[in-house]
C-alpha cells in the first residue's frame, strides 16, 4: 500500500473484538516515517470489522469505533484529498463520514457489502452533497440498502465476502492501464474528456478501456448465485 | 455535464456508484435504484469495486487529535432515537424514499404549473450545473408536446407508464434522450403518468402548438 519501509514499525495493540471465543484479533500497527506524523493503519480481517460494527450498533462500543476509525480515517482523508479538498476540509469530511458510521451503524449489513464498501458509499454521498447548493439530503432517504434485497440470501456474509474477494482478484489481474483508469474514474474529479486529454488518448479509447475493465469484473462475478 | 458521457442505464449506474454524477442526476438514479432490483444488484457490484479500490487508496495521515475531536462530538450527540427507518414506497404518495425530501407536504402541495393535460413543477434547489430537476404529470392517454432537447434529458417513471417512438417505460424505468431525439411521450391509457426529469439546456418544441406552449411547458 505504499507505506514507507524505513523507520520504526511498532505493533501497539492486539485486541480481541466481538466474541472472544472466536479468537478474532485485530492487530493495529503504527508506522512512523522519519519526521512525519504517526501514520496509523491496521490489519483487521473482514470478520473483525463486522464484529466491531455490531459492537458499535448494539453497545455503542467506543473501542470498536476507535479501531474502525484507525482503519478508515486515513483512507477517507486520502479520498477527499485526491478529490481536491484541502487538509482541513478533508479532516472535516472524515469527521462527517465517521459520525455517520457511528450513528448509522445499525444500518450496516455485512450480507450486502463489505464495511469498506459501506464506508466508501457514505464518503461518496458526502462528495455529492458538497456539490449541492440545497441542504444535504439525509443519506437515510436515499440509501438503496434500505430497500429489501432483490433475492433471498443464503449465507449472506460468506457470499458478500466471496464477491469482494473475486473483485479484489479481478482488479489485481487487470492490466496496469485499466486499473489506473478505474481509480481515476472513482477518485478523480475530472470529466471523461479531461481524463482522455490528460492521458493523451482519444475519448473512444478511454471508454473502451473502461468497458474492458468492467467486463472483466463482470465475468469474474459470473456463476454467483443471486 | 449531465451524465458524464453515460449513454446507457448501465453507464449511469456505474457513474452513480463512482460518485461522478451531478446531484440532480445522482438523486434520480437513487430513486431508480429504489424501484429497480436488477439495477440495485448491478449497482452493488460497482459499489463493491469502489470499496475494493477505496481500501487501496493512498492513505493520508490524520491529525493526532482528530479522534479526540470526533469523540467530543459523539458526546454531544443525542442518543439515537429508535425511529423506524423509512421503508420503500409506503408513504409520500408512493414515491421512492429518495424523493421524499422533495415533497415534504405531498405531491398536491407542490407549485404545479398546469397546461391542459400536462402539469409540471421544478425543484430549484437542484438547479446546479445548468441542470433542472422537475416532475411532469401527464393525464392518462395524453402526451406532452413534441419536442427536441438542446441537451440530454433523463426521465424516471414514478407512476403509470408512457410510450414514445422508441419504447414503453413503466414505473422505475429510465428514458435517456439526447439532442438527436425528437419525441412525444404519451401516457398509457390506463392511468396518469408521473415522471421525475433532469434536463440540461433548453427544450425546443417542434410541433405546431410549440410556440404557443413554450412559456408554459419548459420541460
Image (cartoon, coloured by chain):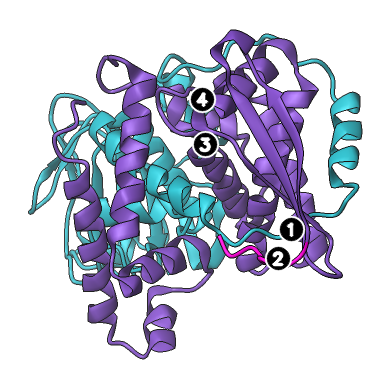
Chain colours: A purple, B cyan
Q: Is B208 left, or right, of A65 in this rendering?
A: left
Circles 2, 1 touching at the beta carbon (< 8 Å) = yes
Circles 4, 2 touching at the beta carbon (< 8 Å) = no
Q: In which quarter of the image is the C terminus of chain B?
A: bottom left
Judge depth for marks 4 and 2 and give the one in front.
4
Q: Residue at x 43, y 14 (%)?
A: B90
| Residue assigned mark 3 | A118
Per the model, the C-alpha gap separating discs 3 and 4 is 15 Å
Do tags 3 and 1 sit on the same chain? yes
Do tags 4 and 2 sit on the same chain? yes
* Lower sequence index among marks 2 and 1: 2
The circle on residue A90 is 1
Q: Is A224 left, or right, of A134 in this rendering?
A: left
Give residue B195's position: percent from left, percent from top: 33, 40
Determine the main secondary structure of the stretch shown in magenta. Answer: loop
| Residue assigned mark 4 | A47
Do tags 3 and 4 sit on the same chain? yes
Judge depth for marks 1 and 4 and give the one in front.
4
The circle on residue A85 is 2
Instruction: Tell whether position A219 is magenta.
Output: no
Q: As displayed, is residue B127 above or below residue B202?
A: above
Q: Residue at x 44, y 86 (%)?
A: A198
Q: Give the range drawn in magenta.
A: A1-7
Per the model, the C-alpha gap separating discs 4 and 2 is 32 Å
Secondary structure at badge 1 equals helix
Amino acid at each position: 500500500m505504499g507505506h514507507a519501509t524505513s523507520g520504526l514499525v511498532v505493533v501497539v495493540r492486539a485486541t480481541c473484538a466481538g466474541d472472544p471465543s472466536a479468537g478474532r484479533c485485530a492487530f493495529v500497527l503504527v508506522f512512523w516515517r522519519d519526521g512525519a506524523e504517526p501514520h496509523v493503519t491496521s490489519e483487521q480481517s473482514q470478520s473483525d470489522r463486522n464484529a466491531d460494527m455490531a459492537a458499535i450498533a448494539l453497545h455503542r462500543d467506543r473501542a470498536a469505533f476507535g479501531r474502525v476509525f484507525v482503519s478508515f480515517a486515513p483512507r477517507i482523508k486520502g479520498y477527499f484529498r485526491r478529490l481536491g479538498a484541502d487538509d482541513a476540509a478533508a479532516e472535516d469530511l472524515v469527521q462527517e463520514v465517521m459520525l455517520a458510521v457511528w450513528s448509522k451503524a445499525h444500518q450496516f449489513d455485512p450480507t450486502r457489502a463489505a464495511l469498506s464498501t459501506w464506508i466508501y458509499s457514505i464518503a461518496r454521498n458526502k462528495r455529492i452533497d458538497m456539490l449541492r447548493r440545497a441542504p444535504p439530503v439525509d443519506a437515510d432517504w436515499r440509501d438503496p440498502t434500505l430497500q429489501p434485497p432483490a433475492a433471498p440470501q443464503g449465507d449472506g456474509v460468506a457470499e458478500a465476502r466471496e464477491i469482494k474477494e473475486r473483485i479484489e482478484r479481478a482488479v489485481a489481474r487487470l492490466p496496469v492501464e485499466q486499473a489506473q483508469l478505474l481509480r481515476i474514474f472513482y477518485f478523480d474529479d475530472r470529466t471523461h474528456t479531461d481524463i482522455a486529454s490528460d492521458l493523451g488518448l482519444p475519448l473512444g479509447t478511454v471508454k473502451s478501456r473502461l468497458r474492458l475493465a468492467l467486463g472483466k469484473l463482470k465475468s469474474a462475478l459470473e456463476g454467483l448465485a443471486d | 455535464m449531465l451524465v458524464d458521457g453515460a449513454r446507457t442505464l448501465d453507464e449511469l449506474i456505474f457513474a452513480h456508484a463512482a460518485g461522478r454524477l451531478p446531484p440532480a442526476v445522482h438523486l434520480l438514479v437513487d430513486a431508480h435504484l429504489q424501484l429497480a432490483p436488477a439495477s440495485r444488484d448491478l449497482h452493488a457490484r460497482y459499489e463493491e469495486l469502489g470499496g475494493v479500490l477505496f481500501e487501496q487508496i493512498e492513505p493520508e495521515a490524520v491529525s493526532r487529535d482528530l479522534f479526540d475531536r470526533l469523540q467530543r462530538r459523539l458526546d454531544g450527540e443525542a442518543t439515537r432515537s429508535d425511529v423506524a427507518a423509512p421503508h420503500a414506497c409506503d408513504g409520500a404518495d408512493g414515491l421512492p424514499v429518495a424523493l421524499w425530501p422533495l415533497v415534504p407536504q405531498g405531491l398536491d402541495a407542490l407549485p404545479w404549473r398546469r397546461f391542459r393535460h400536462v402539469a409540471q413543477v421544478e425543484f430549484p434547489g437542484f438547479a446546479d450545473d445548468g441542470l433542472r430537476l422537475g416532475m411532469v404529470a401527464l393525464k392518462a392517454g395524453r402526451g406532452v408536446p413534441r419536442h427536441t432537447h438542446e441537451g440530454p434529458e433523463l426521465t424516471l417513471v414514478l407512476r403509470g407508464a408512457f410510450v414514445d417512438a422508441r419504447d414503453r417505460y413503466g414505473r422505475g424505468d429510465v428514458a435517456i434522450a439526447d439532442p438527436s431525439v425528437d419525441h412525444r411521450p404519451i401516457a398509457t391509457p390506463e392511468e396518469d403518468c408521473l415522471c421525475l426529469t433532469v434536463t440540461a439546456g433548453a427544450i425546443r418544441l417542434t410541433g405546431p402548438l410549440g410556440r404557443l406552449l413554450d412559456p408554459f411547458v419548459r420541460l
